[in-house]
Amino acid sequence: MPSESKRVCVTGIGAVSPFGRDAESFWRGLTSGTSAVAAIASFDASDLACRVAGEVHDYAPREDMDPEAAAAMGRRSLFAADAAIQALIQSELPINSETVTSIGVAIGSELPASVATTAADIARTVSAGGPVSHLTNAAASGLMAIGEAAEWIRREDCAVAVAGGTDTPITREWIEHYDAAGMLTHANADPERAIKPYDATRDGFALAEGAAMLVLEDEDLAIRRGATILAYLDGYGSTFNRSAVAHAAPNPIDAGRAMQAALMKWDVTLQGEIDVIFGSAGGGAIDAIEGQAIGRVWGPNKDRLWVTAIRAALGHTLGASSAFSAIAAIFCLQSGLIPPTLNLTQQDPACGELEVVTDEVRRLHGTKALVNGFGIGHNASIVISRP
């Protein structure tokens, strides 16, 4: 029977991002105070209204991947496989005939899956024989994959899960698609300052590509095998934006319900325990909705916590974005450093007068972070704590 006291921990992380080919490069980029958003270099974008993005340059598959398997994968799956292998190496999980049947795989992406889903590609790459799921729930996808994989472990559907998000939207087709929806920035003259989360002058986000993956484990298993526990997942909540209109935009009520569910699931008190929120803000309409949702949940206590958002530094990696925020939160809790929200100079009062970390890294003295992933229709939040 599933145990209500069973804890899920993180024992490995991996990333492929515009900052580099591993999680450490991603974290160094976030704490450097610079942005990876630049003029698009992979194709001629001179006729596009949005000509900036966060690209992964000169990527080649890992040398330790089977060449035939790598050749059969698309760019999105290659990124995810790379990040998953990094995370498994760090976890030091033995991969053998006795363990593979207890490994699950959960992947989130916003862009439609091909005939073979990325989750299936990763399961084959690591020989996972547990549950496999590919979620396509907008910007919430990566965080929902992590949260649902944690629930698998709590239910004892598997003992280990590889979970996270991946997307590769830097194509003419997808840039035109998101620009037609009015979502992308047109601040092409100064790419590093193009994305302005929570700022009154924000005009949209810039797309980015990459993958962020975690290895999750039953705490008892991790302890028995002597694994290094990087963090705990202490709460997960997801909600849907209630509306009769297709593709309904996020709203403060339903976004707030996701945060409340994550906070309350494993007895995290609303006002006292969360020290920092890694926001979903990316320089668009979601910024004000998220700020208002935080205000609804915390009320007058919102000035007791810091808020930061990493999309100005990374770009918007769609389904991978919230998984990248989860990795950033883990690094933050380990190091005691909160990366800044770049380019915020004129905070929009509509964003709820949050205490946003700006300009430079801020020192964190707490032990718990909340991570948000809000998108069109879907909302997700998780609580991460330091061991």
Image (cartoon, helix red, strand yellow):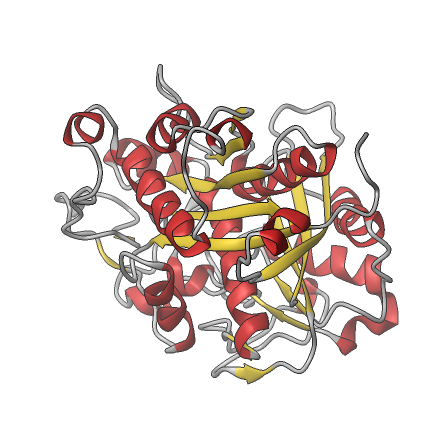
Using the rendered view, name the quadrant where residue 287 is placed. bottom right
- Is residue 4 rendered to the left or right of residue 65? right
- Is residue 63 rendered to the left or right of residue 50? left
Asked whether the viewer can see residue 204, the reply is no
- Is residue 2 rendered to the left or right of residue 288? right
Using the rendered view, name the quadrant where residue 94 is placed. top left
Asked whether the viewer can see residue 9, the reply is yes
Q: Position of residue 372 (x, y in %)?
A: 63, 53
Above or below for 290 versus 377:
below
Q: Position of residue 58 (x, y in %)?
A: 14, 51
**In this orientation, which residue lies closer to the viewer: 19 or 159?**
159
Q: Position of residue 369 (x, y in %)?
A: 67, 64
**In this orientation, which residue lies closer to the viewer: 131 or 138?**
131
Tell me which residue sits at (76%, 31%) in the image: 242
- Is residue 89 rendered to the left or right of residue 301? left
Tell me which residue sits at (78%, 77%) in the image: 304
Q: Position of residue 294 (x, y in %)?
A: 75, 60
Using the rendered view, name the quadrant where residue 54 is placed. bottom left
Quadrant location, the C terminus: bottom right
**In this orientation, which residue lies closer to the viewer: 327 or 242?**
327
Tell me which residue sits at (14%, 43%) in the image: 43
